[in-house]
Image: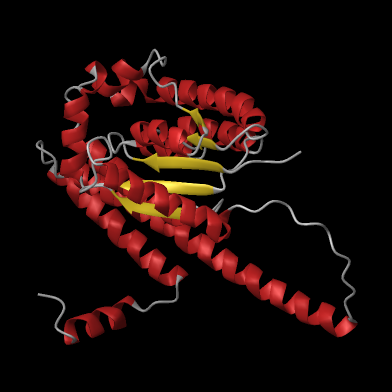
Amino acid sequence: MPRYPYVAVEGVIGVGKTTLVRMLSQDFDAEALLEVFEENPFLSDFYSDRVRYAFQTQIFFLLSRYRQQHEVIPRALTRSVLISDYTFAKDALFARLNLSGDELAVYAKLHLALAEKIPKPNLLVYLRARLDTLMARIAARDRPYERGMDRSYIDSLRLAYDGFVAAYSECPVLAIDTDDLNIVQDTDALSYIRDRIRAALQQGTFQQALPEMLVTLTESDRSALSDLQQAEARADAGRRDAIGEFLSLTRNVGDVSAALSDTFDHAALRESLAACLGQLMRLANATDIDLDEAYRTYTFNGRAQ
């Protein structure tokens, strides 16, 4: 059965995902899959008390997103192109930001079991924007439960999204800066994004399955292939370790941002900076980089002031 392309659009709260998906679905003659977040009964309480309502909010979102994507995506891809304003994978990003301890462990096991049953997109479109732009867009749409949104939380989320996309390997990623793009009022801005998505799909991010071909390998070929596979496996393992350390570092940077908020918690800031330093050292070890030597080179070239 033929499978049409599946494009997922991601980005921080307020960056314009849903608006873009609605407009693109008309241009691509595609089916739109929009996240049903307003039915979450814990969402309003979560924004007023994140610690108390994080677990209930996250589990509800996880099951709701699974139900929607598991039911809709496979059927939709037999009929037309599908464009969604979220990925199932991003649910874990919010969990790592809002949960900890036993709650995070329970969530992680459930997410792992459910994620295996969700089709992966052919292209991930990542919309980026600066913090001031995001806060202005959130204020402009004026959703009741987003009024008084914590600026430090959005900034932490923005950093976490950068880490999430940097580690994302399920499909090619097309990153687009949206600070100067107004797709509602500027048709050229919409055309720019639309053309970039079409080009990305045509460049090989989506291909129909090719017929199987019988290939006969010599013993020498098998040996060379085995060595190559082992080398690639070692490289992939090293890359995964480095990405894992980078994700942890971005979360620690988010903690620094929170500590520098209006309350300015000096003890929390000291702890967060220490965590960042430790994580940076582990990231350097994972990538075989000598931090002392790198810093000496950096200062010698006159880049540090």
| Image location (x, y in percent) of residue 79 | 65, 31
Residue 17 against residue 244 in the figure, above or below: above
Residue 43 against residue 7 in the figure, above or below: above
For the point 52% across and 34% down, the residue is 30
**Protein image colouring:** secondary structure
For the point 18% across and 87% down, the residue is 300
Snapshot quadrant of residue 85: top left
Determine if residue 251 is in view: no
Residue 304 against residue 123 in the figure, above or below: below
| Image location (x, y in percent) of residue 103 | 47, 30
Relative horizontal placement of residue 88, taking residue 21 as reference (left or right): right
Relative horizontal placement of residue 61, taking residue 129 as reference (left or right): right
Snapshot quadrant of residue 148: top left
Q: Tally the marks.
A: 0
For the point 68% across and 33% down, the residue is 78
Towards the viewer: 94 or 108: 94
Residue 41 against residue 301 in the figure, above or below: above
Determine if residue 103 is in view: yes
Relative horizontal placement of residue 126, taking residue 203 as reference (left or right): left
Quarter of the image where the N terminus is located:
top right
For the point 23% across and 83% down, the residue is 296
